[in-house]
Image (tube, grey):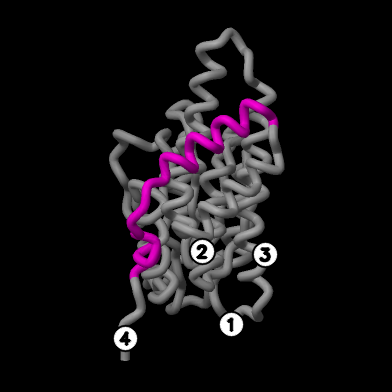
Amino acid sequence: ETPAPEPGAHERVPGDVRMELRGLGRASVRLDSAAMDEIMDSAIARYGLVTAWEEVLAPALHAVGRKWETSEDRYVEVEHLLSWHVSTALRRVVGPVRAGPAEGGTRPVLLACVPHEQHTLPLEALAAGLAELGIRTLMFGGAVPPEALDQAVRRTGPAAVVLWAQARSTANHPLARHVSETSWGVRGARSRTAVLLTGPGWAGRTLGPGMLRPTGLREALSLLSGLCAAPRAVKEPAGRAGS
């Protein structure tokens, strides 16, 4: 029997993606939405989601962002249009994969931006990658309030929680620590969740117990694939009441 490939392994294909990247940049500046959709869908189909994100979609977003920053607020409309079409392309990946029934009892991966953080596209790319792997997700989007995140974790008992922070100013370490320490279930068989700290905002900080910091989409998919296959149980002190 052939062993299952690592997440994203099938996407390490030869090919020059520079043409797609340049084409997407030119189409964005022209505000040519049809061409943008065609280039993104073609790149995802040809190279796979992970490579398309790492080599085409994310670099195009970064290039447009730099163009806006150095042009006295010009090209804002380009950045907005490109972001919307990238999001739409990623959701086209998720849609067909989600059509099949989910396995009963599987624990989802919870995806959320920390409070005051609105950059959701990297999480949307992760959601698409997890959908391709058949892993259930709950996407809560941008700027999730701490109370809402706490309730979501307690109600769903996720296999993992992914927190995105684009900037150091939004990276909320007390919140990450609280989530990693939250447990649920019956006494004697309680569970906790792993917390993946994603995004440049977490860089340079010491990781607490139960926290992981993947370096990119491919590593995040690999870690989450392993975590979803191995439920985490913790022993609670006999006198400690659970929630």
Mark 2 or mark 3: whose residue is earlier in sequence: 3
Image coordinates of residue 226 in percent, x first then y, are 37, 70
Q: Which dot, 2 or 3, sits closer to the camera?
A: 3
Residue 2 disc label:
4
* Callout 4 touching callout 1 (CB < 8 Å): no
Q: Is residue 146 above or below residue 225?
A: above
Q: Which dot, 4 or 1, sits closer to the camera?
A: 4
- For disc 4, the neighbor class at 10 Å (few under 14, some 14 to 19, many from 20) is few
Return the residue at label 1.
103
Q: Nearer the viewer, residue 95 or 168?
A: 95
Return the residue at label 3.
95
The amino acid type found where label 3 is placed reads: Gly
Q: Is residue 135 above or below residue 40?
A: below
- For disc 1, the neighbor class at 10 Å (few under 14, some 14 to 19, many from 20) is few
Mark 2 or mark 4: whose residue is earlier in sequence: 4
Mark 3 or mark 4: whose residue is earlier in sequence: 4
Q: How many marks?
A: 4
Question: Is residue 156 on the magenta stretch?
Answer: no
Query: Is residue 242 something one can see in this rendering?
Result: no
Residue at 49%, 70% (x, y): give it.
Answer: 133
Image coordinates of residue 112 in percent, x first then y, are 57, 48
* Callout 3 touching callout 1 (CB < 8 Å): no
Q: Tell me the distance, in whole angstroms, between the alpha carbons under discs 4 and 1.
A: 23 Å
* Callout 2 touching callout 3 (CB < 8 Å): no
Residue 141 disc label:
none
Residue at 52%, 67% (x, y): give it.
Answer: 132
Return the residue at label 2.
130
Q: What is the span of residues highlighted in magenta in the rendered image?
A: 6-31
